[in-house]
Amino acid sequence: MDRDQANYLFNVMRLDQGASVTLFNGRDGAWRAEVAERGKRGGALQVAEQTAPQRNPPDLWLLFAPIKKARTDFIVEKAAEMGASRILPVQTEFTNSERIRQDRLQAHAIEAAEQCGGTFVPEVADLARLDRLLSDWPEERQLMFCDEALFDRPSPLTNGDATSSGTGTPWAILIGPEGGFSDAERSRLHALPFAHPVSLGPRILRADTAAVAAMTLWQDRLGDWTAPNSDPVR
Amino acid sequence: MDRDQANYLFNVMRLDQGASVTLFNGRDGAWRAEVAERGKRGGALQVAEQTAPQRNPPDLWLLFAPIKKARTDFIVEKAAEMGASRILPVQTEFTNSERIRQDRLQAHAIEAAEQCGGTFVPEVADLARLDRLLSDWPEERQLMFCDEALFDRPSPLTNGDATSSGTGTPWAILIGPEGGFSDAERSRLHALPFAHPVSLGPRILRADTAAVAAMTLWQDRLGDWTAPNSDPVR
Protein backbone atom coordinates (compact mmCIF):
# COMPACT_ATOMS: atom_id res chain seq x y z
CA MET A 1 0.00 0.00 0.00
CA ASP A 2 1.16 3.52 -0.67
CA ARG A 3 0.46 6.31 1.80
CA ASP A 4 -2.73 7.52 0.09
CA GLN A 5 -4.19 4.02 0.00
CA ALA A 6 -3.37 3.41 3.67
CA ASN A 7 -4.84 6.77 4.60
CA TYR A 8 -8.03 5.94 2.70
CA LEU A 9 -8.47 2.53 4.31
CA PHE A 10 -7.58 3.41 7.89
CA ASN A 11 -8.45 7.10 8.30
CA VAL A 12 -11.28 7.62 5.78
CA MET A 13 -12.98 4.21 5.78
CA ARG A 14 -11.74 3.47 9.34
CA LEU A 15 -11.37 -0.25 8.71
CA ASP A 16 -10.72 -2.35 11.81
CA GLN A 17 -8.62 -5.45 12.22
CA GLY A 18 -10.26 -8.40 10.42
CA ALA A 19 -12.14 -6.23 7.90
CA SER A 20 -12.14 -7.51 4.29
CA VAL A 21 -10.96 -5.57 1.27
CA THR A 22 -10.62 -6.56 -2.39
CA LEU A 23 -7.20 -6.06 -4.00
CA PHE A 24 -6.21 -5.96 -7.67
CA ASN A 25 -3.04 -4.86 -9.45
CA GLY A 26 -4.23 -5.10 -13.05
CA ARG A 27 -2.35 -8.36 -13.71
CA ASP A 28 -3.28 -11.05 -11.16
CA GLY A 29 -7.07 -10.94 -10.85
CA ALA A 30 -8.91 -9.91 -7.68
CA TRP A 31 -7.97 -11.09 -4.18
CA ARG A 32 -9.67 -10.85 -0.82
CA ALA A 33 -7.44 -9.54 1.93
CA GLU A 34 -7.96 -8.83 5.63
CA VAL A 35 -6.68 -6.04 7.80
CA ALA A 36 -4.01 -7.81 9.86
CA GLU A 37 -2.75 -4.82 11.75
CA ARG A 38 -3.52 -1.15 12.10
CA GLY A 39 -1.69 1.62 13.84
CA LYS A 40 -1.61 5.40 13.86
CA ARG A 41 0.42 5.69 10.70
CA GLY A 42 -0.95 2.85 8.59
CA GLY A 43 -1.42 -0.88 8.80
CA ALA A 44 -0.93 -4.18 7.06
CA LEU A 45 -3.13 -6.40 4.91
CA GLN A 46 -2.96 -10.18 4.81
CA VAL A 47 -3.94 -11.64 1.41
CA ALA A 48 -6.51 -14.44 1.87
CA GLU A 49 -7.67 -15.91 -1.45
CA GLN A 50 -8.28 -15.10 -5.10
CA THR A 51 -11.88 -14.05 -5.74
CA ALA A 52 -11.76 -13.44 -9.52
CA PRO A 53 -9.39 -14.34 -12.34
CA GLN A 54 -7.59 -11.63 -14.27
CA ARG A 55 -9.88 -10.48 -17.09
CA ASN A 56 -8.40 -8.30 -19.80
CA PRO A 57 -10.40 -6.39 -22.41
CA PRO A 58 -9.79 -6.82 -26.15
CA ASP A 59 -6.88 -4.91 -27.71
CA LEU A 60 -8.78 -1.67 -28.35
CA TRP A 61 -7.28 1.80 -28.04
CA LEU A 62 -9.45 4.88 -27.59
CA LEU A 63 -8.04 8.07 -29.12
CA PHE A 64 -9.92 11.26 -28.26
CA ALA A 65 -9.40 15.01 -28.37
CA PRO A 66 -9.64 16.37 -24.82
CA ILE A 67 -12.53 18.74 -24.19
CA LYS A 68 -13.46 20.61 -21.06
CA LYS A 69 -12.42 19.01 -17.80
CA ALA A 70 -15.62 17.30 -16.65
CA ARG A 71 -16.26 15.70 -20.04
CA THR A 72 -12.63 14.62 -20.45
CA ASP A 73 -12.81 12.90 -17.04
CA PHE A 74 -16.03 11.31 -18.15
CA ILE A 75 -14.54 9.93 -21.38
CA VAL A 76 -11.68 8.31 -19.44
CA GLU A 77 -14.12 6.79 -16.93
CA LYS A 78 -16.33 5.44 -19.72
CA ALA A 79 -13.36 4.08 -21.68
CA ALA A 80 -12.30 2.09 -18.60
CA GLU A 81 -15.85 0.78 -18.07
CA MET A 82 -16.37 -0.10 -21.72
CA GLY A 83 -13.17 -2.11 -21.96
CA ALA A 84 -10.64 0.08 -23.77
CA SER A 85 -7.15 -1.36 -23.28
CA ARG A 86 -5.34 1.97 -23.73
CA ILE A 87 -6.51 5.61 -23.68
CA LEU A 88 -4.68 8.16 -25.84
CA PRO A 89 -5.56 11.86 -25.61
CA VAL A 90 -4.74 13.43 -28.98
CA GLN A 91 -4.30 16.96 -30.16
CA THR A 92 -6.02 17.71 -33.46
CA GLU A 93 -6.17 20.95 -35.41
CA PHE A 94 -9.38 22.00 -33.67
CA THR A 95 -8.60 20.66 -30.16
CA ASN A 96 -8.93 23.45 -27.62
CA SER A 97 -7.12 21.78 -24.79
CA GLU A 98 -3.33 21.98 -25.04
CA ARG A 99 -2.61 20.29 -21.74
CA ILE A 100 -3.98 17.40 -19.78
CA ARG A 101 -3.18 16.13 -16.32
CA GLN A 102 -2.14 12.59 -17.20
CA ASP A 103 -1.83 11.56 -13.52
CA ARG A 104 -5.35 12.76 -12.73
CA LEU A 105 -6.82 10.97 -15.75
CA GLN A 106 -4.94 7.78 -14.83
CA ALA A 107 -6.44 7.99 -11.33
CA HIS A 108 -9.91 8.28 -12.91
CA ALA A 109 -9.29 5.10 -14.89
CA ILE A 110 -8.26 3.26 -11.70
CA GLU A 111 -11.33 4.52 -9.86
CA ALA A 112 -13.62 3.39 -12.68
CA ALA A 113 -12.14 -0.12 -12.51
CA GLU A 114 -12.61 -0.14 -8.72
CA GLN A 115 -16.23 1.02 -9.00
CA CYS A 116 -17.13 -1.54 -11.62
CA GLY A 117 -15.36 -4.52 -10.09
CA GLY A 118 -12.82 -4.72 -12.92
CA THR A 119 -9.39 -6.31 -12.70
CA PHE A 120 -7.81 -4.34 -15.58
CA VAL A 121 -6.84 -0.66 -15.71
CA PRO A 122 -6.18 0.93 -19.10
CA GLU A 123 -3.03 3.03 -19.33
CA VAL A 124 -3.67 6.72 -20.06
CA ALA A 125 -0.98 8.06 -22.40
CA ASP A 126 0.35 11.60 -22.48
CA LEU A 127 -1.21 14.05 -24.91
CA ALA A 128 0.21 13.48 -28.41
CA ARG A 129 -0.35 15.11 -31.77
CA LEU A 130 -2.72 13.16 -34.00
CA ASP A 131 -0.64 13.74 -37.13
CA ARG A 132 2.45 12.24 -35.48
CA LEU A 133 0.52 9.27 -34.10
CA LEU A 134 -0.81 8.55 -37.58
CA SER A 135 2.67 8.82 -39.11
CA ASP A 136 4.01 6.23 -36.64
CA TRP A 137 0.89 4.05 -36.74
CA PRO A 138 1.49 0.37 -35.85
CA GLU A 139 1.19 -1.71 -38.97
CA GLU A 140 -1.64 -4.13 -38.12
CA ARG A 141 -3.87 -1.91 -36.02
CA GLN A 142 -7.18 -0.93 -37.64
CA LEU A 143 -8.74 2.47 -36.94
CA MET A 144 -12.49 3.13 -36.60
CA PHE A 145 -12.92 6.81 -37.22
CA CYS A 146 -16.21 8.51 -36.46
CA ASP A 147 -17.03 11.01 -39.17
CA GLU A 148 -19.88 13.41 -38.50
CA ALA A 149 -20.22 14.05 -42.21
CA LEU A 150 -21.34 10.45 -42.86
CA PHE A 151 -24.97 10.72 -41.72
CA ASP A 152 -26.41 8.69 -44.54
CA ARG A 153 -23.79 5.96 -44.70
CA PRO A 154 -24.88 2.48 -43.71
CA SER A 155 -24.53 1.36 -40.15
CA PRO A 156 -20.93 1.20 -38.86
CA LEU A 157 -18.74 -1.86 -39.21
CA THR A 158 -21.06 -3.80 -41.45
CA ASN A 159 -19.00 -3.15 -44.56
CA GLY A 160 -16.88 -6.08 -45.57
CA ASP A 161 -13.43 -4.64 -45.01
CA ALA A 162 -14.10 -3.83 -41.37
CA THR A 163 -15.75 -7.08 -40.32
CA SER A 164 -13.28 -9.18 -42.28
CA SER A 165 -10.53 -7.82 -40.03
CA GLY A 166 -12.26 -9.84 -37.34
CA THR A 167 -11.78 -10.37 -33.64
CA GLY A 168 -8.23 -10.67 -32.41
CA THR A 169 -7.01 -7.89 -34.71
CA PRO A 170 -5.81 -4.83 -32.76
CA TRP A 171 -8.09 -1.84 -33.25
CA ALA A 172 -8.38 1.80 -32.25
CA ILE A 173 -11.34 4.19 -32.16
CA LEU A 174 -10.79 7.88 -32.90
CA ILE A 175 -13.27 10.47 -31.60
CA GLY A 176 -12.80 13.99 -32.97
CA PRO A 177 -12.99 17.26 -31.08
CA GLU A 178 -16.23 19.23 -30.59
CA GLY A 179 -15.32 21.36 -33.60
CA GLY A 180 -14.90 18.28 -35.81
CA PHE A 181 -11.86 17.37 -37.88
CA SER A 182 -10.25 19.88 -40.24
CA ASP A 183 -10.62 19.24 -43.97
CA ALA A 184 -6.96 18.23 -44.15
CA GLU A 185 -7.35 15.77 -41.29
CA ARG A 186 -10.50 14.29 -42.76
CA SER A 187 -8.87 13.81 -46.18
CA ARG A 188 -5.83 12.18 -44.63
CA LEU A 189 -7.96 9.86 -42.48
CA HIS A 190 -10.08 8.77 -45.41
CA ALA A 191 -6.96 7.94 -47.42
CA LEU A 192 -5.31 5.78 -44.75
CA PRO A 193 -5.48 2.08 -45.63
CA PHE A 194 -6.14 1.04 -42.00
CA ALA A 195 -8.90 3.62 -41.36
CA HIS A 196 -12.61 2.72 -41.43
CA PRO A 197 -14.94 5.72 -41.41
CA VAL A 198 -18.25 5.00 -39.67
CA SER A 199 -21.44 6.90 -38.94
CA LEU A 200 -22.98 7.30 -35.50
CA GLY A 201 -26.47 8.06 -36.75
CA PRO A 202 -28.36 11.11 -37.98
CA ARG A 203 -28.10 13.19 -34.80
CA ILE A 204 -25.04 15.21 -33.79
CA LEU A 205 -23.51 13.65 -30.66
CA ARG A 206 -21.27 15.33 -28.13
CA ALA A 207 -17.77 13.85 -28.01
CA ASP A 208 -18.39 11.99 -24.74
CA THR A 209 -21.60 10.41 -26.08
CA ALA A 210 -19.86 9.50 -29.33
CA ALA A 211 -17.08 7.76 -27.38
CA VAL A 212 -19.52 5.47 -25.52
CA ALA A 213 -21.59 4.82 -28.66
CA ALA A 214 -18.53 3.96 -30.75
CA MET A 215 -17.11 1.62 -28.10
CA THR A 216 -20.54 -0.07 -27.85
CA LEU A 217 -20.64 -0.72 -31.59
CA TRP A 218 -17.10 -2.04 -31.61
CA GLN A 219 -17.51 -4.32 -28.57
CA ASP A 220 -20.78 -5.61 -29.97
CA ARG A 221 -19.46 -6.33 -33.48
CA LEU A 222 -15.79 -7.12 -33.00
CA GLY A 223 -15.08 -7.15 -29.26
CA ASP A 224 -15.93 -9.33 -26.30
CA TRP A 225 -19.66 -8.73 -25.88
CA THR A 226 -20.37 -11.93 -27.74
CA ALA A 227 -17.36 -13.90 -26.45
CA PRO A 228 -17.02 -12.96 -22.78
CA ASN A 229 -14.09 -15.26 -22.11
CA SER A 230 -11.75 -13.93 -24.75
CA ASP A 231 -8.66 -12.36 -23.29
CA PRO A 232 -6.64 -10.99 -26.18
CA VAL A 233 -4.64 -8.12 -24.62
CA ARG A 234 -1.01 -9.11 -24.52
CA MET B 1 -40.18 34.33 -26.24
CA ASP B 2 -40.67 33.94 -22.54
CA ARG B 3 -38.87 36.19 -20.08
CA ASP B 4 -35.94 33.79 -19.48
CA GLN B 5 -35.32 33.38 -23.19
CA ALA B 6 -35.43 37.15 -23.80
CA ASN B 7 -33.08 37.69 -20.86
CA TYR B 8 -30.66 35.12 -22.27
CA LEU B 9 -30.61 36.61 -25.76
CA PHE B 10 -30.47 40.27 -24.87
CA ASN B 11 -28.75 40.45 -21.48
CA VAL B 12 -26.52 37.36 -21.45
CA MET B 13 -25.64 37.00 -25.15
CA ARG B 14 -26.18 40.74 -25.77
CA LEU B 15 -27.49 40.23 -29.30
CA ASP B 16 -27.89 43.38 -31.36
CA GLN B 17 -30.45 44.28 -33.98
CA GLY B 18 -29.92 42.16 -37.11
CA ALA B 19 -28.23 39.27 -35.27
CA SER B 20 -29.33 35.78 -36.34
CA VAL B 21 -30.74 33.11 -34.04
CA THR B 22 -32.08 29.62 -34.76
CA LEU B 23 -35.58 28.85 -33.47
CA PHE B 24 -37.29 25.49 -32.98
CA ASN B 25 -40.45 24.46 -31.17
CA GLY B 26 -40.18 20.68 -31.47
CA ARG B 27 -42.81 20.47 -34.24
CA ASP B 28 -41.95 22.75 -37.17
CA GLY B 29 -38.25 22.20 -37.86
CA ALA B 30 -35.59 24.88 -37.41
CA TRP B 31 -35.96 28.50 -38.55
CA ARG B 32 -33.55 31.38 -38.84
CA ALA B 33 -34.77 34.57 -37.22
CA GLU B 34 -33.29 38.04 -36.81
CA VAL B 35 -33.41 40.42 -33.91
CA ALA B 36 -35.86 43.04 -35.19
CA GLU B 37 -36.01 45.15 -32.07
CA ARG B 38 -34.38 45.29 -28.68
CA GLY B 39 -35.13 47.39 -25.66
CA LYS B 40 -34.35 47.41 -21.97
CA ARG B 41 -36.92 44.77 -21.09
CA GLY B 42 -36.72 42.46 -24.07
CA GLY B 43 -37.03 42.56 -27.81
CA ALA B 44 -38.63 41.00 -30.86
CA LEU B 45 -37.50 38.43 -33.39
CA GLN B 46 -38.52 38.37 -37.04
CA VAL B 47 -38.67 34.86 -38.51
CA ALA B 48 -36.73 34.73 -41.81
CA GLU B 49 -36.67 31.23 -43.34
CA GLN B 50 -36.74 27.54 -42.49
CA THR B 51 -33.23 26.10 -42.18
CA ALA B 52 -34.04 22.45 -41.37
CA PRO B 53 -37.12 20.23 -41.62
CA GLN B 54 -38.65 18.74 -38.49
CA ARG B 55 -36.82 15.49 -37.71
CA ASN B 56 -38.35 13.18 -35.13
CA PRO B 57 -36.59 10.19 -33.57
CA PRO B 58 -38.05 6.68 -33.71
CA ASP B 59 -40.74 5.77 -31.14
CA LEU B 60 -38.35 4.74 -28.34
CA TRP B 61 -38.98 5.35 -24.65
CA LEU B 62 -36.15 5.31 -22.12
CA LEU B 63 -37.13 4.11 -18.64
CA PHE B 64 -34.45 4.54 -15.97
CA ALA B 65 -34.17 4.52 -12.18
CA PRO B 66 -32.90 7.96 -11.05
CA ILE B 67 -29.49 7.93 -9.39
CA LYS B 68 -27.54 10.79 -7.89
CA LYS B 69 -28.18 14.20 -9.38
CA ALA B 70 -25.26 14.64 -11.77
CA ARG B 71 -25.72 11.19 -13.32
CA THR B 72 -29.50 11.58 -13.60
CA ASP B 73 -28.97 14.87 -15.47
CA PHE B 74 -26.48 13.09 -17.65
CA ILE B 75 -28.88 10.27 -18.55
CA VAL B 76 -31.54 12.78 -19.61
CA GLU B 77 -29.02 14.71 -21.72
CA LYS B 78 -27.80 11.51 -23.38
CA ALA B 79 -31.34 10.25 -24.00
CA ALA B 80 -32.13 13.48 -25.85
CA GLU B 81 -28.92 13.23 -27.90
CA MET B 82 -29.38 9.55 -28.70
CA GLY B 83 -32.93 10.03 -29.99
CA ALA B 84 -35.25 8.79 -27.24
CA SER B 85 -38.77 10.04 -27.92
CA ARG B 86 -39.89 9.99 -24.27
CA ILE B 87 -37.96 9.76 -20.98
CA LEU B 88 -39.62 8.05 -18.01
CA PRO B 89 -37.92 8.07 -14.59
CA VAL B 90 -39.09 4.95 -12.72
CA GLN B 91 -39.01 3.89 -9.12
CA THR B 92 -37.88 0.30 -8.62
CA GLU B 93 -37.47 -1.64 -5.39
CA PHE B 94 -33.80 -0.62 -5.12
CA THR B 95 -34.10 2.95 -6.42
CA ASN B 96 -32.63 5.37 -3.88
CA SER B 97 -34.12 8.53 -5.26
CA GLU B 98 -37.75 9.07 -4.27
CA ARG B 99 -38.11 12.47 -5.90
CA ILE B 100 -37.00 14.10 -9.11
CA ARG B 101 -37.30 17.66 -10.33
CA GLN B 102 -39.24 17.01 -13.51
CA ASP B 103 -38.98 20.67 -14.63
CA ARG B 104 -35.20 20.69 -14.23
CA LEU B 105 -34.83 17.43 -16.15
CA GLN B 106 -37.10 18.73 -18.92
CA ALA B 107 -34.89 21.84 -19.17
CA HIS B 108 -31.86 19.54 -19.57
CA ALA B 109 -33.56 17.74 -22.45
CA ILE B 110 -34.26 21.08 -24.17
CA GLU B 111 -30.67 22.22 -23.67
CA ALA B 112 -29.32 18.96 -25.13
CA ALA B 113 -31.48 19.47 -28.25
CA GLU B 114 -30.22 23.06 -28.55
CA GLN B 115 -26.56 21.99 -28.17
CA CYS B 116 -26.82 19.24 -30.74
CA GLY B 117 -28.84 21.13 -33.34
CA GLY B 118 -31.89 18.93 -32.85
CA THR B 119 -35.45 19.87 -33.73
CA PHE B 120 -37.15 17.42 -31.33
CA VAL B 121 -37.30 17.50 -27.52
CA PRO B 122 -38.30 14.32 -25.67
CA GLU B 123 -40.91 14.76 -22.96
CA VAL B 124 -39.67 13.91 -19.45
CA ALA B 125 -42.45 12.21 -17.48
CA ASP B 126 -42.96 12.42 -13.73
CA LEU B 127 -41.46 9.69 -11.55
CA ALA B 128 -43.68 6.59 -11.66
CA ARG B 129 -43.50 3.18 -10.02
CA LEU B 130 -42.13 0.50 -12.33
CA ASP B 131 -44.65 -2.11 -11.17
CA ARG B 132 -47.57 0.19 -12.06
CA LEU B 133 -46.08 1.12 -15.44
CA LEU B 134 -45.72 -2.58 -16.26
CA SER B 135 -49.30 -3.31 -15.18
CA ASP B 136 -50.61 -0.61 -17.55
CA TRP B 137 -48.13 -1.37 -20.33
CA PRO B 138 -49.29 -0.36 -23.85
CA GLU B 139 -50.14 -3.48 -25.81
CA GLU B 140 -47.79 -3.27 -28.80
CA ARG B 141 -44.73 -1.69 -27.20
CA GLN B 142 -41.70 -3.99 -26.88
CA LEU B 143 -39.33 -3.65 -23.90
CA MET B 144 -35.56 -4.14 -24.08
CA PHE B 145 -34.47 -4.84 -20.54
CA CYS B 146 -30.80 -4.81 -19.61
CA ASP B 147 -30.08 -7.65 -17.23
CA GLU B 148 -26.68 -7.62 -15.52
CA ALA B 149 -27.03 -11.31 -14.81
CA LEU B 150 -26.88 -12.17 -18.52
CA PHE B 151 -23.13 -11.84 -19.09
CA ASP B 152 -22.81 -14.90 -21.26
CA ARG B 153 -25.92 -14.46 -23.36
CA PRO B 154 -25.42 -13.75 -27.04
CA SER B 155 -25.26 -10.20 -28.24
CA PRO B 156 -28.44 -8.17 -27.67
CA LEU B 157 -31.29 -8.02 -30.15
CA THR B 158 -30.00 -10.67 -32.47
CA ASN B 159 -32.46 -13.30 -31.27
CA GLY B 160 -35.37 -13.82 -33.59
CA ASP B 161 -38.18 -12.55 -31.42
CA ALA B 162 -36.62 -9.14 -30.97
CA THR B 163 -35.56 -8.44 -34.54
CA SER B 164 -38.78 -9.80 -35.97
CA SER B 165 -40.62 -7.03 -34.18
CA GLY B 166 -38.83 -4.78 -36.63
CA THR B 167 -38.55 -1.07 -37.22
CA GLY B 168 -41.75 0.91 -36.83
CA THR B 169 -42.79 -1.07 -33.75
CA PRO B 170 -42.83 1.08 -30.60
CA TRP B 171 -40.11 0.10 -28.15
CA ALA B 172 -38.82 1.00 -24.71
CA ILE B 173 -35.46 0.45 -23.00
CA LEU B 174 -35.34 -0.16 -19.24
CA ILE B 175 -32.15 0.56 -17.29
CA GLY B 176 -32.14 -0.70 -13.70
CA PRO B 177 -30.84 1.11 -10.63
CA GLU B 178 -27.22 0.88 -9.39
CA GLY B 179 -28.29 -1.87 -6.98
CA GLY B 180 -29.80 -3.93 -9.81
CA PHE B 181 -33.33 -5.28 -9.97
CA SER B 182 -34.83 -7.25 -7.08
CA ASP B 183 -35.42 -10.95 -7.60
CA ALA B 184 -39.17 -10.32 -7.80
CA GLU B 185 -38.71 -7.61 -10.42
CA ARG B 186 -36.33 -9.74 -12.46
CA SER B 187 -38.72 -12.72 -12.43
CA ARG B 188 -41.63 -10.54 -13.45
CA LEU B 189 -39.65 -8.90 -16.26
CA HIS B 190 -38.49 -12.23 -17.66
CA ALA B 191 -42.08 -13.51 -17.71
CA LEU B 192 -43.54 -10.53 -19.60
CA PRO B 193 -44.38 -11.43 -23.21
CA PHE B 194 -43.21 -8.04 -24.53
CA ALA B 195 -39.88 -8.01 -22.63
CA HIS B 196 -36.55 -8.88 -24.29
CA PRO B 197 -33.66 -9.37 -21.86
CA VAL B 198 -30.30 -8.38 -23.34
CA SER B 199 -26.70 -8.37 -22.18
CA LEU B 200 -24.41 -5.34 -22.27
CA GLY B 201 -21.19 -7.32 -22.19
CA PRO B 202 -18.97 -8.93 -19.57
CA ARG B 203 -18.08 -5.77 -17.62
CA ILE B 204 -20.34 -4.13 -15.06
CA LEU B 205 -21.49 -0.73 -16.39
CA ARG B 206 -22.73 2.21 -14.39
CA ALA B 207 -26.35 3.09 -15.11
CA ASP B 208 -25.48 6.15 -17.19
CA THR B 209 -23.05 4.16 -19.35
CA ALA B 210 -25.60 1.36 -19.73
CA ALA B 211 -28.20 3.87 -20.94
CA VAL B 212 -25.98 5.16 -23.77
CA ALA B 213 -24.81 1.65 -24.70
CA ALA B 214 -28.37 0.27 -24.79
CA MET B 215 -29.66 3.17 -26.90
CA THR B 216 -26.71 2.68 -29.29
CA LEU B 217 -27.54 -1.01 -29.79
CA TRP B 218 -31.21 -0.24 -30.32
CA GLN B 219 -30.66 2.64 -32.77
CA ASP B 220 -28.13 0.57 -34.67
CA ARG B 221 -30.29 -2.56 -34.93
CA LEU B 222 -33.86 -1.28 -34.94
CA GLY B 223 -33.74 2.51 -34.98
CA ASP B 224 -32.80 5.23 -37.44
CA TRP B 225 -29.03 4.82 -37.65
CA THR B 226 -29.42 2.86 -40.82
CA ALA B 227 -32.44 4.75 -42.19
CA PRO B 228 -31.84 8.42 -41.37
CA ASN B 229 -34.98 9.69 -43.07
CA SER B 230 -37.46 7.61 -41.15
CA ASP B 231 -39.78 9.68 -39.03
CA PRO B 232 -41.97 7.30 -37.08
CA VAL B 233 -42.93 9.27 -33.96
CA ARG B 234 -46.60 10.14 -34.18
Image (cartoon, coloured by chain):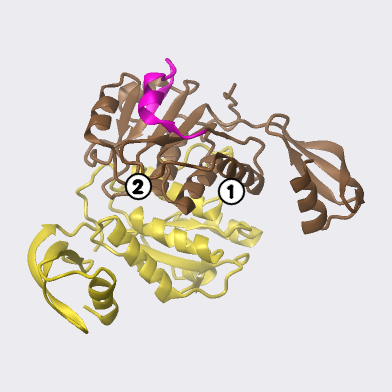
Chain colours: A brown, B yellow
Q: Residue at x 14, y 65 (%)?
A: B19
Q: Give the range drawn in magenta.
A: A126-143
Q: Residues within 10 Å of mark 1 (few under 14, many from 20)?
A: many
Q: Is residue A134 magenta?
A: yes
Residue B13: x, y in percent? 26, 68
Q: Which mark is residue B219?
A: 2
How crowded pointer 2 is (Cα within 10 Å; few <14, some 14-19, many 20+) is rated as many
Q: Give the x, y percent position of residue A200.
A: 32, 42
The answer to whether residue B145 is visible is no
Q: Where in the figure is residue A222, as x and y percent of width and height? A: 45, 29
Q: Is residue A142 shown above or below A83?
A: above
Q: Is residue B9 left or right of residue B65?
A: left
In the figure, residue A64 lies in which quadrant? top left
For residue A64, the mark is none
C-alpha distance separating marks 1 and 2: 20 Å
The amino acid marked with disc number 2 is: Gln
Is B27 displayed left or right of B177 in the figure?
left
Between residues B137 and A97, which one lies in front from this camera angle? A97
Q: Which residue is drawn at 28% across and 50% down?
A: A203
The chain to which mark 1 is attached is: B
Residue A192, above or below A106? above
Residue at the image position 24 percent from the left and 58 percent from the top: B56
Task: Note whether B214 is above or below A135 in the view shown.
Answer: below
The residue carrying mark 1 is: B148
Q: Which chain carries label 2?
A: B
Q: Residue furthest left?
A: B48
Asked if labels 1 and 2 share a chain, the reply is: yes
